[in-house]
Image (cartoon, rainbow, N blue to C red):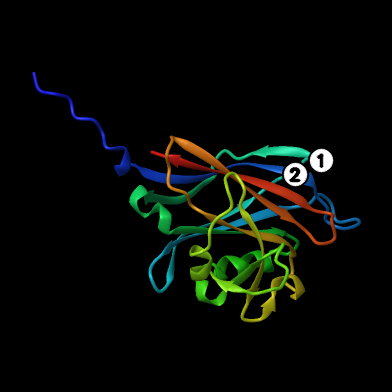
Amino acid sequence: MGRRKKKRRGGADIELHLRRVEIALAYDGPLRGAPEPVLLFGVYRVADTDVTLLSRRAIALRVGSGVPETIEIEDGHLGVHIPSSQARRMLVLAIALEEDGGEGVRRMYAELEAPPSLEAWAVDAVMPRPLSLLEWARQEPPPAPATTRVHLVDTHGDLRDQKLGDDWIGAAIVHVPPQRGRRSERRLRFASEDGKNDWTAVLEVRRV
């Protein structure tokens, strides 16, 4: 009887799933009803000289009457299978908006398609120095489960200063890690500068 071949763990794919969102604070202004958080995700493949969008997803959340609360996401797959051999060359950009009319959500979803138009710098940076997504991919990521909160700029300037039609909450960058186990989690925090919205998304990185 011949030996049974073992499945090569290095050949597994990696999937990204939004598992839950922890709402610590949520506000939609006076007399405007319940907040309507929307999270946008762009998943990018990084090459030597550019980054390419592989998948994008907009996920709208329904906030109940009691905050803080945790919203479990039933269908949070970000729509891409990543060969583990390429995992070191992947980046996720996440954007959080509080939807009012939807104009800002539509605009930022469209901008995820054109990564050269977007630059970011870390929220805790001493001096603003916007970097392209390609440059971010070369940065040393924070230790898990942390991710990097960033300010985002496009061709029109700082997104915090623009009239989007929806309220800007924040953005975060995730380096997709090489997988040593079956799954791991990354925490993406979004907090508005007025202190009235504070959300944390939990992204699962899973070997399949």
Distance, label 1 to label 2, CA atoms, is 7 Å
Residue drawn at x 61%, y 67% as measured from the top left: 108
Query: Picture coordinates of residue 98 (x, y %)?
Result: 74, 58
Contact check, label 1 and label 2, Cβ < 8 Å: yes
Q: For the view shown, which residue lies furthest in the right direction?
A: 30
**Image quadrant in which the N terminus is located:** top left
Report the side of 93 relative to 90 (left or right): right
- Residue 137 position (above or below residue 6): below
Pick the front one: 206 or 128: 128
Amino acid type of the residue tagged 1 in the rendering: Val
Pick the front one: 25 or 2: 2
- Residue 53 position (above or below residue 11): below
Residue drawn at x 57%, y 38% as measured from the top left: 74
- Residue 202 position (above or below residue 5): below
Amino acid type of the residue tagged 2 in the rendering: Ile
Q: Residues within 10 Å of mark 1 (few under 14, many from 20)?
A: few
The answer to whether residue 114 of the structure is visible from this angle is no
Report the side of 171 relative to 25 (left or right): left
Query: Picture coordinates of residue 91 (x, y %)?
Result: 49, 59
Query: Could you say which disc has been placed on residue 23 in the image?
Result: 2
Query: How many numbered tags mark residues here?
Result: 2
Query: Picture coordinates of residue 142 (x, y %)?
Result: 59, 52
Query: Picture coordinates of residue 162 (x, y %)?
Result: 74, 75
Q: For the view shown, which residue lies furthest in the top direction?
A: 1
Chain-order first, disc 1 or disc 2: 2
Report the side of 14 relative to 155 (left or right): left
**Image quadrant in which the C terminus is located:** top left
Q: What kind of element bears circle 2?
A: strand
Question: Which residue was labeled with disc 1?
Answer: 67
The answer to whether residue 80 of the structure is visible from this angle is yes
Q: For the view shown, which residue lies furthest in the left direction?
A: 1
Q: What kind of element bears circle 1?
A: loop
